[in-house]
Amino acid sequence: MNVKKFLARMATAAALTAAAAAAQADTYQFTLTGAYNASWQLQSTVTPDEVYDGQGFILYDQLGFPGASQGYVDLYFYNADLEGGGLEIYDYYGDVSLMAGLGAQLYSGTEDSPTFNVGTYTLTQYQSTETYTLTITNISAVPEPASMALLLGGLGLVGAAAARRRRSENEEALDNA
């Protein structure tokens, strides 16, 4: 088999395998306990719906929060410039804050391109001594189906290239015999 063709196929297989690894997004589990309890999931990196006056960012219409008038809330993630950081869970449709806790900044990067930080945080209710515990964990142990398809496609190409090379070498050996 032509070495250039073999190397080109190997490069294609490697690119597909690398694409499979890059395609997998980390999913983070957020668990809030205290006077208000909630649990939700977000990707490790998100695209904010709005940057909040240089003090953080907002994710609008997040579904599945208890006590929200229509089931949706807006999540305000505050940066370190606002009392060190924190989180507010705001029921836009009911016009009420379900929880506003100040504490550590929960993300790194910029407000336009944040990445959540895994860990356990203590948040103190705004203008109160009441505390909440927020735990952020990575739950992305299982690859997404698209990632697995890309990985298997890449491995298939590697296997096909190796089989074809072996067959070519065997045919060449028989011709020389």
Image: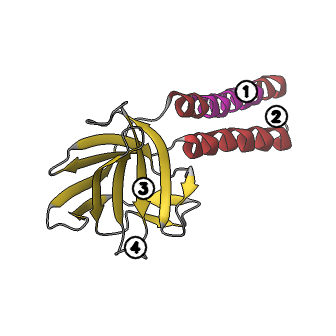
Callout in the foreground (2, 3): 3
| Mark 2 or mark 4, earlier in chain | 2
Type of amino acid under label 3: Tyr
Question: Residue, x 57% and y 59% (percent of image)?
Answer: 113
Q: Residue 100 sits in which quadrant?
A: bottom left
Residue to which mark 2 is pinned: 1
Q: Position of residue 120 (x, y in %)?
A: 24, 60
Type of amino acid under label 1: Arg
Magenta span of residues? 152-170
Instruction: Please give the count of numbered marks on the rendered protein.
Output: 4
From the viewer's perspective, is residue 156 above or below residue 117?
A: above
> In what quadrant of the picture does the C terminus appear?
top right
Residue to which mark 4 is pinned: 82
| Mark 1 or mark 3, earlier in chain | 3
In the drawing, what numbered circle is on residue 39? Answer: none
Q: Residue 91 sits in which quadrant?
A: top left
SS label for mark 1? helix
Q: CA distance from mark 4 to mark 3?
A: 12 Å
Callout in the foreground (1, 3): 3
Residue to which mark 3 is pinned: 76
Question: Residue, x 71% and y 31% (percent of image)?
Answer: 161
Question: Residue, x 67% and y 30% (percent of image)?
Answer: 157
Q: Are marks 1 and 2 in contact (CB under 8 Å)?
A: yes
Question: Residue, x 41% and y 38% (percent of image)?
Answer: 93
Residue to which mark 1 is pinned: 164
Q: CA distance from mark 2 to mark 3?
A: 59 Å
Q: Are marks 2 and 4 in contact (CB under 8 Å)?
A: no
Q: Position of residue 96 (x, y in %)?
A: 33, 47
> Does the stretch in magenta take in 161?
yes
Report whether 133 appears left or right of 25: left
SS label for mark 3? strand
